[in-house]
Amino acid sequence: MSTASKEFLKQAAYKAPDLGHRAKLRWALDQAEIGFTRGKSRMDGRWESARQRAYEVKWEAINHLDQYLLQFEEAVRRRGGHVYWATDGEDARRYIVNLAKQRNVQRIVKSKSMVSEEIHLAEALEHTGADVLETDLGEYIVQLRKEPPYHIVTPAMHLSRTDIADLFREKLGAGDDDTPETLVAIARHTLRDGFVQADMGITGANFLVADVGMAAITENEGNARLSASLPKLHVVLTGIEKIIPKLEHLGLFWPMLATAGGGQSITAYNTLIGGPRQPGETDGPEEFHVVLLDNGRSALLADAEQRDVLHCIRCGACLNVCPIFLSVGGHTYGTTYPGPIGSVLTPHLRGLNDFGHLSFASSLCGACTSVCPVKIDLHHHLLQNRRNAIQETHRPAGERIGFHVWRWFMQSERRYGRMGRMAQRLLRLFQSMQLENTPLDPLRPWTRYRTLPPAPQASFREWWQKNRGTQA
C-alpha cells in the first residue's frame, strides 16, 4: 500500500464521522445542486443537446491537439507574445521562476489556477523571495490558512462564515462583524493594494481559442482581469488540453461552464487576452507569456480508451454530486484534483502505483457521468483504472490469493452455492459470539462505523427453490 493510499484511509476515517464538517459540505453542495437545476431549466430542454455538442467540439480539439496548439502559438507570437512548451511541472516552474528573476519581480498577484496548484508554483516563487498573493477570495482564504484548495471551483467550501471571520481576526486584525459584506470588504482592501503594487500577474485559462490565439478566462470577482491587465508582466499557465478550435465555440462553452459550475447563465467576468498591450490600447501588460503544460497529458492523449478525460473543463459538477466527496471532503484525496475527475486523472498524471487507490474510492453510482457537461464517461474510467491498477501494479499477496479463491468459487454454480451456505453459518456463529465492534472482531473495519445486519435464515437461491417465483 502506497504512502498516499495510507494517508487517504487515515484522513477518510477522520473526516467521514465528522458531522460538523459534513453539515458544512452538505449545505454547500445542496446550494450547488439548486443552482445547477435552475441553470439547466433556463436552457429550455436543450441541456442534453448542448452536452452532446460540447463533447463533439472537445473531441475534435483533443484528437487534433497538435494542429490546434500550433495554430494558437502562431497567433500569440504574431501579436508579440511568447509561448513556452513545458514538459513537466519542474520545467514550467523553472521557466516562470527564471522569468521573475530576470525581470526583478518582487510582488506577484495570482488568480485561481488549478494548474499552478498542480505544479506547486507559488511555493517555488516564494523561495526566490517574491511575495505571492492569491487574489481569488476563496484562494486567499486558504492561503491564509496555509492549505491547498478544497474544491476545483470553491476553494474554501469547507469553511463557514464564522471560520472565515475568526481567520480574518487572527491574520488581518479584523473586528467582530462577520457579515459577508464586511468580510468581503476586508479582503478587498488587502487585495486592491496587491494589484496596484504587483510586478507580475499569473492567471490560468479556462479555454485556449486556437483560431484567434487568445486565452479565455472566466471568473466572478474581477480579480483575474486585474491580474492580467495591471502588472507589466502577465503569465498564463495552462494545460495543453484547454484548447478549443474556434472563437464561436465560446458561445457554447461559457454558458455550459457557468451552468455546471455555479448554476449561472453566464459568469460575471469573461476575458479574452492574447498578447501584450498593442499601440493605442489603454491597458494590458507590456509583456505576455503563455506556458503550455504537458505534465503527463500527452501520455493520456495516447490512451484511446481514456483520452476523453482531457475534455474536462474543470467545472466541478462531478464533485458536487459525488457521495464519496461528500463523505470524506476534498483534502482527503491528497491531490490537486479531488472527486471523480481527480480519481480518474491523477493516476495518469502521478502514477498508478501511488494513486491507483483513488479509483477504488467510488460507489460507481454514475452520478458524475450524468452531470458532466462534456460527457466524460467517468464511472467507466474509474473501472478501467481499477483494472489497470490490478494488472500493472504490485498487489499484496493476501489480496491476490483472495481474488483467486473468489474466482474459483464463482466459476462453479455448485461451489458458489456452497460458499454462500458456509458464509451464512460463519455469520451466525460470529453474531452468536457477540464479538461485534470489539478488539477481537474480524469485521471491525466494517462494524466500527456500521451495524452488521442479521444473518438471513435462507439464501435467495434457497428461497427461490422453495417458492419457485409464486410469491411477489
Image (tube, rainbow, N blue to C red):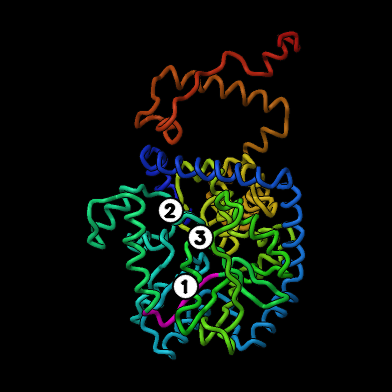
Residue drawn 48% across the image and 42% down it: 326
Q: Secondary structure at mark 2?
A: helix
Q: Is residue 281 above or below residue 163?
A: below
* CA separation in Å, label 3 and label 2: 24 Å
Q: Which mark is residue 220?
A: 3
Q: Mark 3, residues whose alpha carbon is within 10 Å: few (<14), some, or many (≥20)?
A: few
Q: Which mark is residue 331?
A: 2
Q: Front-most of 251 and 109?
A: 251
Q: Position of residue 265 (x, y in %)?
A: 61, 52
Mark 3 vs mark 2: in front: 3
Q: Which mark is residue 434?
A: none
Q: Position of residue 385 (x, y in %)?
A: 63, 53
Q: Earlier in the sequence, mark 3 or mark 2?
A: 3
* CA separation in Å, label 1 and label 3: 12 Å
Q: Are marks 3 and 2 in contact (CB under 8 Å)?
A: no
Q: Secondary structure at mark 1?
A: helix
Q: Which mark is residue 226?
A: 1
Q: Secondary structure at mark 3?
A: loop
Q: Mark 1, residues whose alpha carbon is within 10 Å: few (<14), some, or many (≥20)?
A: some
**Given the image, on which type of amino acid does mark 3 rest?**
Asn
Q: Earlier in the sequence, mark 1 or mark 2?
A: 1
* CA separation in Å, label 1 and label 2: 29 Å
What segment carries the magenta color? 197-204
